[in-house]
Amino acid sequence: MVVAALVALLVSTVWYGPLLGRARLEELGPGGLGQRVAPMRTLFLTFVLMLVSSAMIGHMFARVGPATLALKPWLYFMMSGGLAGAFVIPAMWINYTNLRVSTRLALIDAGYWIAAYLSMGLTYFVMAW
C-alpha cells in the first residue's frame, strides 16, 4: 500500500515536473494555484491522499483474491484504471466544468490520474509476482 502510494507520488513529480509542468503552469499563469501552496506541503498531502487511494485499490485486489488475480492478471490494470476512469476523472471533470477550468488543464490532470492509478495497479501486480 505504501509502496504503491510512493510510486504514484513519483508519477506525480514526473507528470507535473519535466513532463507537463510547463504546460500546466501556462494554464494556471504566474501566481496561479500551483504557486500558492508550499511544495513540501503539496508533496505530503499528495502522498497522504494517494495512500488512501492505494489502500482502496489494495482492498479491491484482496477481495478478488490472489488465485483469481494469478489467473487474470489484467484485472490489476482494469480495476485500477477503471477506478480512475469511472470515478476519479468524471468527478474531477464535473468539478472543473463548474469552476470553468480550461479543457487543456483538465486533460493534463485527467492524464495524471490515469497514469497514477495504473502505476499503483502495476505496483500491486509486480509485488504479487
Image: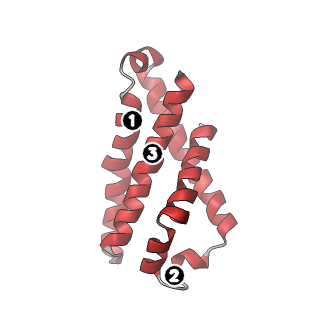
Q: Which mark is residue 32?
A: 2
Q: Is residue 122 left or right of residue 9?
A: left
Q: Which of the two residues, 115 or 56, is positioned nearer the viewer here?
A: 115
Earlier sequence position, callout 1 versus callout 2: 2
The three-letter code of the residue at mark 3 reads Tyr
The N terminus lies in quadrant: top right
Residue type at tag 1 = Phe
Mark 3 closeness class: few <14, some 14–19, many ≥20 residues within 10 Å: many
Q: Is residue 84 above or below residue 29?
A: above
Whole-percent x and y of residue 21? Answer: 51, 69
What secondary structure is found at the residue carrying circle 2?
Answer: loop
Any mark on residue 69, and which? none
- Give, as a three-letter code, the residue at label 2: Gly
* Mark-to-mark CA distance, 3 and 2: 26 Å
Marks 3 & 2, CB-CB < 8 Å contact: no
Please tell me whether residue 19 is drawn above or below residue 63 in the rendered image. Answer: below
What color scheme is it? secondary structure
Q: What is the spatial separation of the Cα atoms under label 3 and label 1, in whole angstroms?
A: 8 Å
Give residue 55's position: percent from left, percent from top. 54, 38
| Secondary structure at numbered mark 1 | helix
SS class of the residue under badge 3?
helix
- Sequence-wise, which precedes: disc 3 or disc 1? 1
Query: What residue is at 35 percent from the left and 58 percent from the top?
Result: 91
Mark carried by residue 77? 1
Residue at 50% from the left image edge and 40% from the top image edge:
120
Residue 70 locus on image (x, y percent): 43, 17
Q: Quadrant of residue 37?
A: bottom right
Residue shown at 37%/42% (left/top)?
81
Q: Residue at x 62, y 64 (%)?
A: 42
- Residue 117 numbered mark, or none: 3
Side of 26 where 128 appears, left or right: right
**Which one is earlier in the sequence, the residue at label 3 or at label 2?**
2
